[in-house]
Image (cartoon, rainbow, N blue to C red):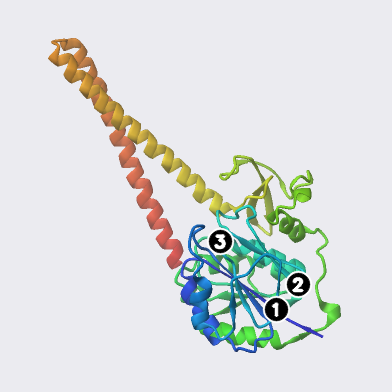
């Protein structure tokens, strides 16, 4: 008989406090390994193991590539590296970013489900947008257990809400009840014949190979999904559209991956950046025309001076229109974000 012996936890904004609370309540004899991805800056010093060790009764490990996964230990993804489950081993790799993150939650969840099947417990904690949703869908599809932090108890509820939209049968718990549920699930026995095997379509395995930079899979022309009209924000390549149970996401040829919400947020950022650049160019043009008008006036070229002043005035008016538009757009984005985070939108 087997037990659920792999706990995969994904967290983003607001996740440090949530992880500390969970780890502090887990017993030192937990019959499972705990793998954690917390979104961090790529250039941050790896202080998370020390921070979490202060709260945890279990030893907290800063993993290396090809470390053997051992029960009773906590493994935390280092900055700028994915952690990927490969059988009973842990890969620590700088594979393609997903949703602009490395480490990212989805590669951990997908690879854990592919290797451990029903033995996985996937947990989504506080965070922005919808990171981890696609991975939790795979965990549940393979028969693993899904736990989602109650959005009302999350500092940033977007990630938990997104997970629940796509995995509605996940157990929804406040933070203080999650450790007890982890222990309970790890103590349940699973008949060997009930353990999940490789999925018929092999999607999780294919995407795990891509995250590992397996060139045989990256160069495989049999891509998941179909070509879209969008370009990858990271490398400019064609994005392939993948839709599973109404959850839309994208992946490019070399493996960069995005959910529709992350791609939309990036496109809005790109548009805003372009508009601010246009505003700067207009302001600089107006300033140049005024200077030319002054020089023409000082040289007693009245007609030229008037012509440059007219151009400066028209350009300034265009800049004002664009500036007002940018202020309205930014205010609208702030209001939309606030509604999403409070659940009123």
Tell me the element at label 2. loop
Nearest the viewer among 312 and 64 is 64
Which one is earlier in the sequence, the residue at label 3 or at label 1?
Answer: 1
Give coordinates of residue 131: x percent, y percent: 57, 62
Q: Quadrant of residue 80?
A: bottom right
Label 3, residues with CA under 10 Å away: few <14, some 14-19, many ≥20: many
Residue that badge 2 annotates: 88
Left/right placement of residue 17 relative to residue 164 reads: left
Nearest the viewer among 245 and 72 is 72
Tell me the element at label 1. loop
Residue that badge 3 annotates: 130
Which one is earlier in the sequence, the residue at label 1 or at label 2?
Answer: 1
Residue shown at 25% from the left, 28% from the top: 287
Residue shown at 55% from the left, 49% from the top: 263
Give coordinates of residue 222: x percent, y percent: 79, 46
Left/right placement of residue 59 relative to residue 194 reads: left
Label 1, residues with CA under 10 Å away: few <14, some 14-19, many ≥20: some
Residue that badge 1 annotates: 70
């Amino acid at each position: 008989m087997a037990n659920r012996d792999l706990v995969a936890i994904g967290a983003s904004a607001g996740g440090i406090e949530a992880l500390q609370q969970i780890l502090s309540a887990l017993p030192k004899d937990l019959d499972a390994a705990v793998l954690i991805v917390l979104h961090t800056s790529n250039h941050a010093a790896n202080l998370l193991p020390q921070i979490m060790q202060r709260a945890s009764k279990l030893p907290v490990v800063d993993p290396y590539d090809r470390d053997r996964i051992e029960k009773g230990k906590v493994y935390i993804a280092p900055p700028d590296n994915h952690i990927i489950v490969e059988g009973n081993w842990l890969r620590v790799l700088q594979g393609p970013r997903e949703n602009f993150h490395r480490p990212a939650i989805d590669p951990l969840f997908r690879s854990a489900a592919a290797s451990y099947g029903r033995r996985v417990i996937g947990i989504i904690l506080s965070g922005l947008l919808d990171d981890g949703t696609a991975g939790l869908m795979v965990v549940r599809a393979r028969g693993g257990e899904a736990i989602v932090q109650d959005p009302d108890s999350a500092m940033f509820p977007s990630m938990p809400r997104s997970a629940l939209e796509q995995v509605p049968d996940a157990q929804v718990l406040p933070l203080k009840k999650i450790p007890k549920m982890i222990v309970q699930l790890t103590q349940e026995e699973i008949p060997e014949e009930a353990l999940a095997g490789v999925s018929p379509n092999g999607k999780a395995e294919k995407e795990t190979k891509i995250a590992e930079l397996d060139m045989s899979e990256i160069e495989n022309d049999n891509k998941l999904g179909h070509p879209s009209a969008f370009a990858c924000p990271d490398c400019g390549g064609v994005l392939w559209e993948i839709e599973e149970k109404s959850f839309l996401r994208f992946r490019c040829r070399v493996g960069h991956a995005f959910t529709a919400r992350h791609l939309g947020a990036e496109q809005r950022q790109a548009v805003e950046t372009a508009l601010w650049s246009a505003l700067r160019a207009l302001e600089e043009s107006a300033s140049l025309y005024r200077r030319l008008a002054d020089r023409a006036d000082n040289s007693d070229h009245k007609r030229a001076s008037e012509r440059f002043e007219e151009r400066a005035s028209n350009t300034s008016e265009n800049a004002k229109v664009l500036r007002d538009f940018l202020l309205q757009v930014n205010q609208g984005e702030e209001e939309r974000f606030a509604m999403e985070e409070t659940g009123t939108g």
